[in-house]
Image: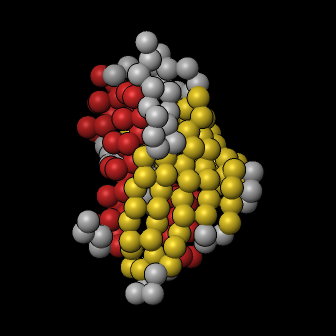
């Protein structure tokens, strides 16, 4: 029996930045490429259409010798094409990114939904609230959680977040 996940994962950060700066990290090629992907990985964006129902397509690439070796050990390619779209899009306020997860061995293709809210605060910070919906099973959701936590460290360092 598949171990189903019932709840979404919510991650919140407050960064000393403005909404536009954080928004562009999600909605522009340069911004997305600057932080997306766990430590040891990078992305090359092919398409990013920053609008409702706009496409997002990128390669997730093992960028360090350690990650390349780990991928080989798992029998996985060092680069994977990832496809998604922005299903909700309100500039500098909210976006929903829906991606197709069709690259994991022994896991049926399924969608991943990530909702992001940007809430300006009076102190010059912006709250970024990320809600990730459940994936296929507990193992897959755990992998998503670990990967996202790893890639968030790139933003934490950039904006001096100390958690």
State whether residue 144 is above or below residue 23: above
Instruction: Please state the horizontal and vertical placement of residue 111, each as a whole percent of the image.
Output: 60, 34
State whether residue 94 is above or below residue 41: below
Instruction: Please state the horizontal and vertical placement of residue 43, each as a whole percent of the image.
Output: 49, 48
Q: Which colour scheme is used?
A: secondary structure
State whether residue 158 is above or below residue 17: above
Instruction: Please state the horizontal and vertical placement of residue 156, each as a whole percent of the image.
Output: 32, 65
Looking at the rendered image, the quarter that the N terminus falls into is: top left
Q: Residue at x 37, y 52 (%)?
A: 151
Q: Residue at x 69, y 50 (%)?
A: 87
Q: Residue at x 43, y 58 (%)?
A: 35
Question: Residue 117 vs residue 73: left or right?
Answer: right
Is residue 31 visible in this depiction of the protein? no
Q: Residue at x 54, y 59 (%)?
A: 116
| Residue 134 or residue 40, whichever sits in front | 134
Count the marks: how many? Answer: 0
Instruction: Please state the horizontal and vertical placement of residue 71, each as a whole percent of the image.
Output: 35, 29
């Amino acid at each position: 029996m598949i171990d189903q996940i019932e709840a979404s994962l919510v991650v919140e950060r407050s960064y000393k930045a403005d909404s536009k700066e954080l928004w562009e990290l999600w909605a522009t090629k340069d911004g997305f490429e600057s932080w997306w992907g766990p430590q040891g990985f990078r992305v090359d964006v092919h398409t990013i259409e920053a609008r409702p129902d706009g496409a997002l397509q990128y390669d997730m690439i093992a960028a360090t010798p350690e990650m390349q070796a780990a991928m080989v050990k798992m029998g996985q390619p060092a680069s994977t094409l990832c496809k998604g779209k922005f299903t909700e899009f309100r500039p500098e306020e909210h976006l929903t990114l829906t991606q197709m997860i069709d690259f994991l061995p022994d896991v049926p293709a399924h969608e991943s939904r990530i909702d992001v809210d940007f809430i300006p605060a009076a102190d010059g910070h912006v709250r970024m609230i990320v809600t990730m919906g459940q994936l296929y099973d507990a193992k897959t959701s755990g992998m998503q959680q670990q990967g996202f936590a790893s890639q968030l460290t790139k933003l934490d360092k950039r904006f001096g977040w100390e958690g």
